[in-house]
Amino acid sequence: MAIVWASIRTHLRQQGLSPVAWLLSGLFPIALAYVARQLGREADLRLVAGVSAAAMIDTAAALVVLTVLSERQWGTLRTVAGTTRRPELVLVGRLCGVLIQTLTVVPVTYAFVSVAWGLVPVPAPAVAVAGALVLAAGVVIVMMPLVAVLVRFRYHPGMTNGIPAVILAFTGALVPLAQLPSLMRACATVLPSAWAIEAVGSGQWRTLGYGVAVMAGWALLGGVLLVLVFRRLRLRPDAFEV
Amino acid sequence: MADRWLTYAWLSYKGLYTWLNPWGYLSSRVVRPIAVCLLFLPLGGNDEAAMLRLLIGSTLLVMATDVVFGVALAVGNERSFGTLGTVIASPVGLPATLAARAFPHVVDSFLGSVTTAVIAAAVYDIPLTPGQIARGVLALVVVGVSSTGVGIAVSSVALRFRDVFLAPNIARVVLIALSGALVSAGDLPEWLGVVSGALPIHHAITYVLGVPDGRAFALVLELAVGAAWATAGYVLVGLMIRSGRRAATVDLT
């Protein structure tokens, strides 16, 4: 647990004030909310959740790449692998740091939408708060397989740029899922963020429950991939570095 | 002369565009633009005219952002890769150098944008008339040229500061919200409408979708916006280089 806490602290110290991260989590949701509202979307909780999800996905993808690359460059994974501790915990801590950073998007978006178009009513506050947490956690957990890939394989600049855009398009962040083509709607069902947005918008615990179940599936997949990747890499410590 | 310039352009594209590996290119120049287009198109609902506008706006947006990022990387990486000093010392003028850095990205982004438009139109079954296609293609070329100026202006930041990606990301957000690509300029508040008029895409989308009488003038205005940005970019790059030389920060240490 000490490794996780230390890793969270390191992450926030290193990336907490990163200008790109603040831009993506601060300015990007404002721009998207403005566009969606001008194109006829209601200034309601679903808009807040959807736009927050969009900014979270963009921020989390960028931070995850920076995180894994910096750990590999610093050689910390190799060092930890040489001890009795598990190197996966370093990355888990960093992902928790990313989660904390992405959570800041929700109040920023809520404040902007409320100031610009009137206070957004929150009919079911408990579902909204839980939904925001599931949204942020879902966005970060979906990135776990990406973390495994970045640890295992050589990094090529730009190779992850399309991933947040694809997740965003399939999440139905800016419109209700019903307006997406059927194939995209089907893909959205395996994304926890899509369920969390719907849950926050509708105030239904049941929908949020589906989101938690899907998120658990991603966590399992990501966890297994990370364990397998690190088990393989422990045999070749040089491969931990860039 | 032209051959040599094209060779410079090709070499700079190969050497400075860090996303040119197969995975980076596929992800950044193929998958991302298509996904961005698919993200914004559903905002049109079931309204055919709105969908058509969003298809054209998203395609122009993809073109502009790809050019801005490409040029920003190509110019900014001169410093990251330690070749900026050589560029400054070479007898080739700065305008020709910047144009050579930008040209391949305009061509590359054009191809990517056309692919994006075709796939997005097919996914959402949006019909386009031959006239709209022809005007769209011409608008893409003009937006490519006008965005080059923004790309050069944005890249100047990377010649003085370490962060290559901050300025192009700010430009991307501004283009999304204010260029008129997604939100019609008429729907913007008056003062933001003025800002929008000074950005790429604003006049090009008027050319594609506007009334026939004002079309040619809209293209001229788009090119004028590009020329203004290119001039500003040239001045900014020159200032940043001079500032870097004074502070001995041309090379990253």
Image (tube, rainbow, N blue to C red):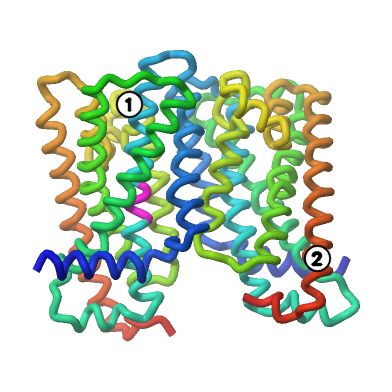
At horizontal 62% and vertical 39% (from top left) the residue drawn is A53
Is B66 magenta? The answer is yes
Is residue B214 or residue B184 the one in the foreground? B214
Q: Which amino acid does the dot numbered 1 rest on?
A: Ser
Q: Are marks 1 and 2 on the same chain?
A: no
**What percent of the width, then of the height, locates residue B152?**
26, 59
Per the rendered image, the range of residues in magenta is: B65-69
Give the position of the C terminus of chain A as an image quadrant.
Answer: bottom right
Relative to B226, residue B99 above or below: below
**Residue that badge 1 annotates:** B184
**What percent of the width, then of the height, locates residue A208?**
79, 30
Residue A11 lies left or right of residue B214; in this view the side is right
Q: Secondary structure at mark 1?
A: loop
Q: Which chain's residue wears label 2?
A: A
State the image quarter where residue A177 is shown. top right
Relative to A221, residue A209 above or below: above
Graded by Cα atoms within 10 Å as few (under 14), some (14 to 19) or many (20 or more), the crowding at tag 1 reads: many
State the image quarter where residue A151 is shown. bottom right
Marks 2 and 1: in contact by CB < 8 Å? Answer: no
- For the residues labelled 1 and 2, the Cα–Cα distance comes to 48 Å
Q: Which chain's residue wears label 1?
A: B
Q: Which amino acid does the dot numbered 2 rest on?
A: Glu
Is B186 magenta? The answer is no
Give the position of the N terminus of chain A as an image quadrant.
Answer: bottom right
**Residue that badge 2 annotates:** A88
Is residue B146 or residue A32 the one in the foreground? B146
